[in-house]
Amino acid sequence: MTELATLTKEVLWAFFLGGMLLGGISQRTHFCTMGAISDVLNMGDWTRVRQWVCAIGVAMVGFAALSDLGLIDPSQTLYASTRLMWLSSSVGGLLFGYGMVLASGCGNKTLVRLGGGNLKSVVVFVVMGISAFATLKGITAVLRVNTVDSVFLNMPSGASLQALGVPGLGYFCGVVLLLLVLRQKEFWAFDNFLAGVGVGSVIVAMWWVSGHLGFVPEHPETLEAVYLATNSGRIEAISFVTPVAYTLDWLMFFSDQSKLLTVGVASVAGVIAGSAVVALWRKTFRWEGFANPRDLGQHLIGSVLMGVGGVTAMGCTIGQGLSGLSTLSLNACVALIFIVLGAVISLREQAARLERTACA
């Protein structure tokens, strides 16, 4: 049992350090989904989108390599399913994408901004976490289970592109995405490579930590195979909606022996810490609050939509857009498409509102 406790600590520290890397990279390079979409719509600048595509490509190739080398079992990941939850993924993705614009960024960006001194992100963090927990186990969970979650397609061979049975599909998809990015010479800059390769590599590393380092074939008490320190009991990488909910739960019930520290909570703390370190080092740390009540209200609505939508879609821009997509999950594909659609709608509405205000 002593060895098991030591191994659990190693897994948790690894996720904390992985979170620190992700937070530090995001703070330095401004890696952000909403920002990437906004850049394209408002300025025609595809740089941050290419950072995302590069990260996805690296994560796909890395996940495929870990699977082929037998270091992880892809059928045991959080995203492995025989159900295509198309309605949950689309509705949840749409809500999350719309909400992240109102809340000034996705779950990862919220933690990064929090580490940089943004007090608005504290409010987003708390409200998103509460909304997510309610959608996991509370009043909106009942609504979710009885509506969108009841609509799905059974796919016995797996709700994944891997079900096509094409050898090396993960490598192919990942390499194609990387080539699409690398053929653009304007992408060849240190910060862009740091964002794309760095973030993608963090996802791959966390797959290895959770699925290999933290795998115990036979737990000494239950005699069953177990993946240490995960909330789902399966292999997990990085995500930032459900883990924020569990972070609040852990903080509020810290003395409860049944509330154990998990990899999601460790990664949340890591992102905040990593972002703070880089912000202080680069002297960009500054306190920032709400401009007015309208600003507060907009962030509150966005936070609720992100919490509800992120759980309904089974992940956020990092959870589904990187971790889930690296496994070639169809649910992740649907969720990401609708996250982007929701963000585009929200950004267009904001632009139209600003135009009306300017003309008034």
Image (tube, rainbow, N blue to C red):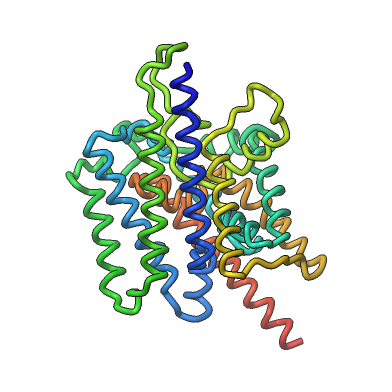
Q: Quadrant of the C terminus?
A: bottom right
Of 20 and 109, which appears nearest the observer? 20
Of 346 and 123, which appears nearest the observer? 123
342 shown above or below 206:
below
Badge count: 0
Residue furthest out toward the left: 167
Q: Residue at x 58, y 72 (%)?
A: 348
Q: Is residue 283 left or right of residue 184?
A: right
Residue furthest out toward the right: 293
- The image shows residue 145 at horizontal and vertical percentages of 58, 34
Q: Residue at x 48, y 61 (%)?
A: 25
Q: Is residue 132 left or right of residue 32?
A: right
- Name the quadrant containing residue 115: bottom right
- The image shows residue 52 at horizontal and vertical percentages of 41, 62
Q: Is residue 88 left or right of residue 82?
A: right
- The image shows residue 347 at horizontal and vertical percentages of 59, 70
Q: Residue at x 81, y 69 (%)?
A: 292
- Name the quadrant containing residue 223: top left
- Name the quadrant containing residue 73: top left
- The image shows residue 226 at horizontal and vertical percentages of 42, 23
343 shown above or below 267:
below
Q: Residue at x 43, y 27 (%)?
A: 227
Of 43 and 120, which appears nearest the observer? 120
